Amino acid sequence: MKDRVLEHSKEMIRLGSKSFAGAARILPTATRRSVYMLYAWCRYCDDQIDEQDLGRDAPSRFSGSADVLAKLKSQTQRALDGEHVGEPAFAALQRVVARHDIPARHPLELLRGFEMDVEGRSFVTLEDTLDYCYHVAGVVGVMMALVMDAREQEALDRAADLGIALQMTNIARDVIDDAHAGRVYLPLEWLDEANVPVDEVADPRHREAVFGVAKRLIESSELYYSSAVHGLSWLEPRCAWAIATARGVYREIGRTLLRRGTEAWDSRTYVGRPQKAARALMAGVEAALAVGRRRRRTVSPDSRKGLRERP
């Protein structure tokens, strides 16, 4: 008999993120199933808040509802308390949390990130933007690390750094689309320095200035990508390879944006299959080196100096 929750979760990641689905195929079977199920819950909540279907077909303006958020909070808490919710995504969350002993605060931190959108929070400083990045992505990295049986605090810090880096790349890639929807995640201080009014981010007249700010964000993400590579040392080889692959693909999206310059938002920036294959091969080498670092105990905590600390 087919596992309906697992099959639903697998379909969610297949349709919702080709990059993550590709990287997940490298994982050991049991870990991969848990990753599918955790992704399914994250994707479902994100879609409900954004009024999307698997990250697509968003409304022209963001109108995230406090009622929708309240419902997600209630359903998530009920699932965490062991109640039957009905929606497969919450059954998936229940299984993952129970199987990997994930603290309830972590799923709730993700919902706090969505609450920032619903509240219309402004992101004045880089620290404000990083706070958002942690809540909508960094904490997902933490939960993924727990799924992969990495429980050391240093490992969780590095996992959060990777999630933050991925979200910074997402922000840079989606700047114009987000602005059209009424959302701006670039630090307002940086936009002010570039003489870009917050309500004119999508205006073609400011394209060069906006690109300069997005470039600054991508360059800032490098510190987090660099820190994250050390987190591979706490993972088993196949898990390290999968995470290194996802890291490499997303990092390449940022680099592609920089190469495209002011044309970066004329069409969606993505990494093609040949580049993904190349990144996967390079990731295998990174993973092998990371395992060697763990054995030699050469990972230095100083490599996180100056980065955002987890709550």
Image (tube, rainbow, N blue to C red):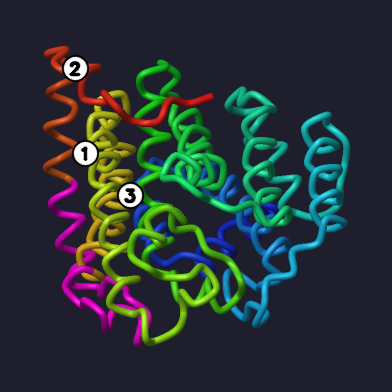
Determine which residue is flagged by label 2. Answer: 300
Label 1 or label 3, whichever comes before in sequence order: 3
Residue 189 lies, with reference to residue 292, above or below; the image says below
Determine which residue is flagged by label 1. Answer: 226
**Secondary-structure class at tag 2:** loop
Examine the structure image and report whether residue 239 is included in the region drawn in magenta: no
What is the quadrant of the N terminus in the image? bottom right
Cα–Cα span, label 1 and label 2: 12 Å
**Secondary-structure class at tag 3:** loop
Q: Is residue 177 rendered to the left or right of residue 301?
A: right
Residue 286 lies, with reference to residue 182, above or below; the image says above
User: Three-letter amino acid code at disc 2?
Assistant: Ser
Does the image show residue 1? no
User: Three-letter amino acid code at disc 3?
Assistant: Ile
Does the image show residue 50? yes
List x then y, in percent, for residue 124.
50, 49
Which residue is depicted at the point 68% across and 45% down? Answer: 92
For label 3, count other residues whose C-alpha is less than 10 Å away and answer few (under 14), some (14-19) or many (20+).
Answer: some
Q: Main SS of the magenta segment?
A: helix
List x then y, in percent, for residue 109.
64, 36
Examine the structure image and report whether residue 277 is included in the region drawn in magenta: yes
Q: Quadrant of residue 25?
A: bottom left
Residue bounds of the magenta highlight: 258-283
List x then y, in percent, for residue 170.
41, 61
Question: Which is closer to the viewer, label 1 or label 3?
Answer: 1
Q: Which mark is residue 26?
A: 3
Label 3 or label 2, whichever comes before in sequence order: 3
